[in-house]
Image (tube, rainbow, N blue to C red):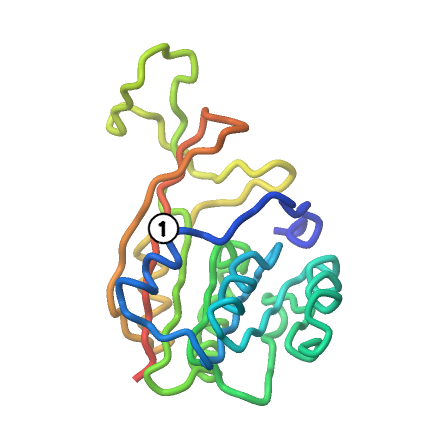
Amino acid sequence: MKNWGKIKLNKNSVPNETVFRIIGNLKLKIKNKKILDLGYGTGSNLREFHKRGGKIYGADIRKESIFKMIKEFKSLKKNFLICDFNSAFPEFKNKMDLMLCKDTYYYIKEKNRINFLINCKKNLNKNGIIILQYIQNFLVQDYNRKDFSINLNTVAKTKKYFQRGNNIKLIQTNKILGEINKAKLKIKTNLFDISTHLKNKKYISINRYIILKNE
């Protein structure tokens, strides 16, 4: 976690397909809605929200991320803040209609996570939505196999997500559900997807998306 702010950005990243599939399936309106991406990295999802007419806001610990978005969206420079979620939460004048927290939650220390979610709720409009994603399981497959079959029941599970230079401990689902309950957020629905990466086919990520609502 201490290396969170030093992770290099993937310059070739694109908007996350699953995020926008969720938005489409739930028929969430984007145009003129205030959208905050917590830990937005390269900003590819924010750019897509902007193309769809959303009013975008972002917070990230990396100065590189903030400066890049301010340079690109000069008229919106007040909408992008440097923030370490372990010690603070980004405060904007407006409450948000939608928050995205993807590949961010497991970088927040356990003692700070409930307060993080409480702050999300505090800064969310009534009937607002939070899309919270985390890696539920991280699997190691036999990359020497020559066929295309993968039996997830026989793939080795790990307790960490092996990210170069910053391995992170996976969070147990019951922990996250308990934290959501204590923050008094409601679960609208949830789903998962499976991903591998071209650079290293050895690893399989089981990604869980929890859609939370503020009532």
Q: Is residue 206 left or right of residue 31?
A: left
Q: In which quarter of the image is residue 63?
A: bottom right
The number of numbered discs placed on residues in the rendered structure image is 1
The amino acid type found where label 1 is placed reads Gln
Q: Residue 109: percent from the left, percent from the top?
A: 54, 59
Q: In this view, does 60 lie to the left or right of 168?
A: right
17 is higher (above) or lower (below) than 157 = below
- Residue hosting label 1: 172
148 is higher (above) or lower (below) than 27 = above
Q: Residue 4: percent from the left, percent from the top?
A: 64, 52
Q: In this view, does 72 lie to the left or right of 116?
A: right
Q: Residue 114: percent from the left, percent from the top?
A: 44, 70
In front: 203, or 32? 32
Q: Quadrant of the C terminus?
A: bottom left
43 is higher (above) or lower (below) than 53 = above
Which residue does the image show at 53% across and 69% down from the upper left? Answer: 50
Element type at marker 1? loop
Q: Residue 28: percent from the left, percent from the top?
A: 33, 72
In front: 15, or 168? 15
Which residue does the image show at 32% across and 83% down from the upper left? Answer: 127
In front: 56, or 86? 56
In front: 12, or 189? 12
Which residue does the image show at 45% across and 71% down from the upper left? Answer: 99
- How many residues crowd around disc 1 within 10 Å: few (fewer than 14), some, or many (20 or more)? few
Q: In which quarter of the image is residue 65?
A: bottom right
